[in-house]
Image (cartoon, rainbow, N blue to C red):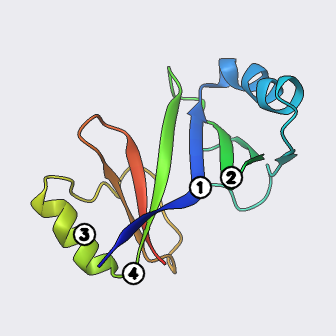
Amino acid sequence: MTFEGSVNIAMKIPAAQYPDTVAFYRDVLGLPAKDVTGTDIAAGVTRSVRVEFGPSVLWLDEVPNYSRSDVWLELSTDDLPAAMERLAAAGATARDELEPLPDAMRAHWIANPAGVVHLVAQA
């Protein structure tokens, strides 16, 4: 069983900071950005912009009930059950209550010791 960083990074942003944050990445930094609001965005997210962030994708998600921004990372693994056992043994148990996942997706949410959320997904 192995882990590796995946391409997705999500920044969960309070509504009051959302327009300026999107403008920063799109207009100030000039990174390619596409508004994907209205597509299959995560539950609890009201708007989302997909930003090409080098080899990664930075998802700028507006979350109205947040009081501060939060960054979420993605890990991929070749063996999800073994990965979750290893993580649980280290104290990082599944936190699937954080955000619903699609039924067909083989993945779980966890948090690192500092509280940073990670999606652990079957590659």
How far apart are labels 4 and 1 at the CA level?
17 Å
Q: Earlier in the sequence, mark 2 or mark 3?
A: 2
Residue appearing at x 48%, y 57% in the figure = 74
Q: Which residue is mark 1?
A: 8
From the image, tell me which residue sits under label 3: 84
The answer to whether mark 2 and mark 4 are in CB contact below 8 A is no
Q: Sequence order check: which comes first, mark 2 or mark 1?
A: 1
**CA distance separating discs 2 and 3:** 24 Å
Determine crowd level at label 1: few under 14, some 14-19, many 20+ residues with C-alpha closer than 10 A.
Answer: some
Residue type pointed to by label 1: Asn
Q: Earlier in the sequence, mark 2 or mark 4?
A: 2
Q: Position of residue 61 (x, y in %)?
A: 65, 40
Residue 78 disc label: 4
Q: Quadrant of residue 75?
A: bottom left
- Proximity of marks 2 and 1: CB atoms separated by less than 8 Å: yes
Mark 3 secondary-structure assignment: helix
Q: Nearer the viewer, residue 44 or 113?
A: 113
Q: Quadrant of the N terminus?
A: bottom left
Q: CA distance from mark 4 to mark 3?
A: 11 Å
Which quadrant of the view contains residue 63? top right
16 w.r.t. 61: above or below: above
Q: Which residue is mark 2?
A: 57
Task: For mark 1, give the secondary structure.
Answer: strand
Find residue 114 and name its label.
none
At horizontal 85% and vertical 22% (from top left) the residue drawn is 28
Q: Residue 70, position in %: x, y?
A: 49, 32
Residue type at mark 3 is: Met
Q: Is residue 20 left or right of residue 67?
A: right
